[in-house]
Amino acid sequence: MTRQNLSETERAELIAVAHALADAARGATLAHFRQADLTADSKEDARFDPVTVADRASEAAMRAILAERRPQDGILGEEMGASAGSSGLTWVLDPIDGTRSYLCGTPTWGVLISVADAAGPVYGLIDQPYIGERFEGGFGRAAMQGPHWARPLRTRPARPLAECIIMTTFPEVGSAAEGEAFHRLAQQCRLTRYGTDCYAYALLAAGHIDLVVEAGLQAYDVQAPIAVIEAAGGVVTDWAGAPAHQGGRVLAASHAEVHQAAMVALRG
């Protein structure tokens, strides 16, 4: 797989479109957030996998912009599936990452937007509409902006696992074996926190934590975080060190040394 050779003009256009998508998704998601009449359907029978009117409205708003400004590109979205393009680029969209958190009213959900070529994501945004924070990475950019400050993104320096902060969304992580591996690693870390969805990846890119470890992810869950974290100096792979942009088991680390130590712990 080869990387697309994009001009500065093309990169600037992709960045502008990504921010336009995030702006549209902000409006669509905030229109329903913390509303008393918000309900959810479940996409699965065996477990509660919620989807709301806000998820669908957010993706629809983003797709409308892409249809106008980037009709040549492919799209992969959580709610509306995949559509092919002719440019070699694909927009990977998660209109609300953390719908469970969205339903609960906690501001740890986010909108994930990335653009990828055949080799994986080249640029991504993690946007938290309610807080008003946006994290971007790729094309030589690694920065966040919010209501209190705008600053560059840089991951934490290397440190022993015993000094690391690790986060994941669900304490059970994935399968029983995956959960056992995660907790084996977490027991070697200083602090473990749960339930922050995509916001954990933003915190890693911003230099506040050291590790995010998850399993059972889809491409739209992880491609934007990969772009942001790698631009900030971090490392994202699967648990064996291979590319993770198709999802599955994901290990995000602040530094290559932390990443290596975490892989050893996950293997047991």
Image (cartoon, rainbow, N blue to C red):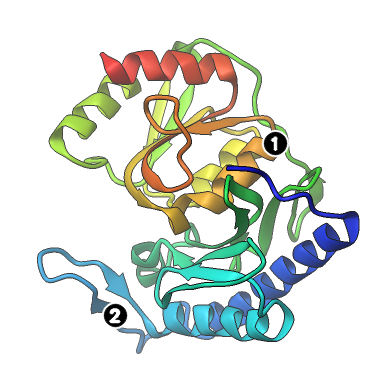
Q: Is residue 197 left or right of residue 125?
A: left
Local secondary structure at mark 1: loop
| Residue 29, above or below 93 | below
Q: Quadrant of the N terminus?
A: top right
Q: Earlier in the sequence, mark 2 or mark 1?
A: 2
Report x, y in % for residue 48. Answer: 19, 67
Three-letter residue code for mark 2: Ala
* Residue 69 in the figure: left or right of residue 107: right
Residue placed under numbered mark 2 in the picture: 40
Q: Is residue 97 above or below residue 75?
A: above
Few, some or many residues within 10 Å of mark 2 (<14, 14–19, 20+): some
Front residue of 134/255: it is: 255
Pick the front one: 196 or 220: 220
Residue lying at the far right in this picture: please name it: 9
Tell us which disc is closer to us: 2 or 1. 1
Residue for point 41% across, 26% down? 191
Outermost residue toward the left in this view: 46
- Whether residue 180 appears in this view of the structure is yes
Q: Which residue is mark 1?
A: 232
Is the C-beta separation of discs 2 and 1 under 8 Å?
A: no
Residue 101 placed where, x, y %? 38, 62
Q: At x 81% / y 51%, what residue is drawn?
A: 150
Q: How many marks?
A: 2
- Residue 144 is situated, as x and y percent measured from the top left of the image, at 74, 50
Please give the name of the residue rendered at 63% of the width and 61% of the height, measured from the top-left corner. 88
Can residue 188 be seen by looking at this rendering?
no
Pick the quarter of the image with the C terminus.
Answer: top left
Left or right of 233 on screen, residue 130: left
Query: What whole-number distance in Å separates the C-alpha atoms at marks 2 and 1?
Result: 35 Å
How many residues crowd mark 1 within 10 Å: few (<14), some (14–19), many (20+)? many
- Mark 1 belongs to which amino acid? Ala
